[in-house]
Amino acid sequence: MVFGDARVLGLIPTYRTFEVCCLETPRKALLRHRITAARYRELLCAQGGGCGICGGPAWREPVGLVPLPIDHDHPCCPGRDSCGQCVRGLLCAGCNGFLGLIELHGNAMLSSERWIEAARAYLACAGVDPWDPDRFTAGGRIHRDRRIRDGMDCRCYHCTDNPNGAGGWIAAAIATGQPVWDEIVRRTAQKRAKANELGPNLDEL
């Protein structure tokens, strides 16, 4: 599994680029994900020492640099723990959260097209097709079960079967064979354009 260094692609601004990374291993996370410290360092090295998407380090106030969280495939192992075989890579907290939104609802928030393409490449390198029909359905079922367990009222497609709910358009695109990634880029570009009209130009940050 090989990941391109997203820092070279300019996915994060220069002032956020770090020349150092945390070489420690998250001991508890290693146990939860059933991988060795050597495997963790192998993943870290393959990613150029940073997050598998943005290339940056993991940073937590007031501690500073911390080990990158381990990302695993939730349709395989729905909880916090994993079997170890479905570990996909190492991600910073921000990219990990955004990736979850993309896989579930196709929502990239206000991410740049370069970030979306880096996320797409990350999943491809891990052998994951997020728009496989069975996989998309399984991910939605896990999400719905969590919301029911936590007593949360969620109005997304997965929780209501409403095609107008968040993620409903993906189900329609999958059913008709439409390119989902291209539509995510298009929708995100529209949101960024509207945001730029209201505040600082996101493309200049």
Image (spheres, rainbow, N blue to C red):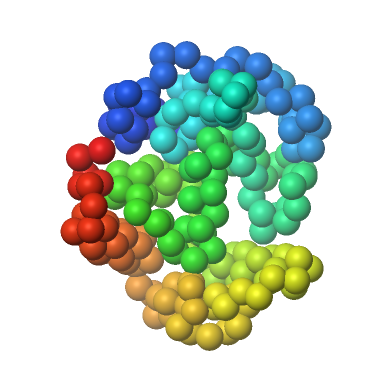
Residue drawn at the location 64% of the way across and 45% of the way down: 72
Asked whether the viewer can see residue 83, the reply is: yes
Residue drawn at the location 44% of the way across and 72% of the way down: 170
- Counting from the top left corner in percent of width and height, residue 9 is at 29, 32
- Counting from the top left corner in percent of width and height, residue 100 is at 54, 54
Position of the C terminus, as image quadrant, is top left
- Counting from the top left corner in percent of width and height, residue 164 is at 45, 83
In the displayed structure image, the side of residue 148 where residue 126 appears, left or right: left
In the displayed structure image, the side of residue 92 where residue 119 appears, left or right: left
Above-or-below relation of 34 to 144? above
Residue drawn at the location 75% of the way across and 30% of the way down: 30
- Counting from the top left corner in percent of width and height, residue 48 is at 45, 22
Above-or-below relation of 83 to 37? below
Residue drawn at the location 41% of the way across and 14% of the way down: 19
- The total of numbered circles placed on residues is 0
Q: Nearer the viewer, residue 5 or 57?
A: 57
Q: Nearer the viewer, residue 125 or 82?
A: 82
Above-or-below relation of 189 to 49? below
In the displayed structure image, the side of residue 33 where residue 11 appears, left or right: left
Above-or-below relation of 195 to 162? above
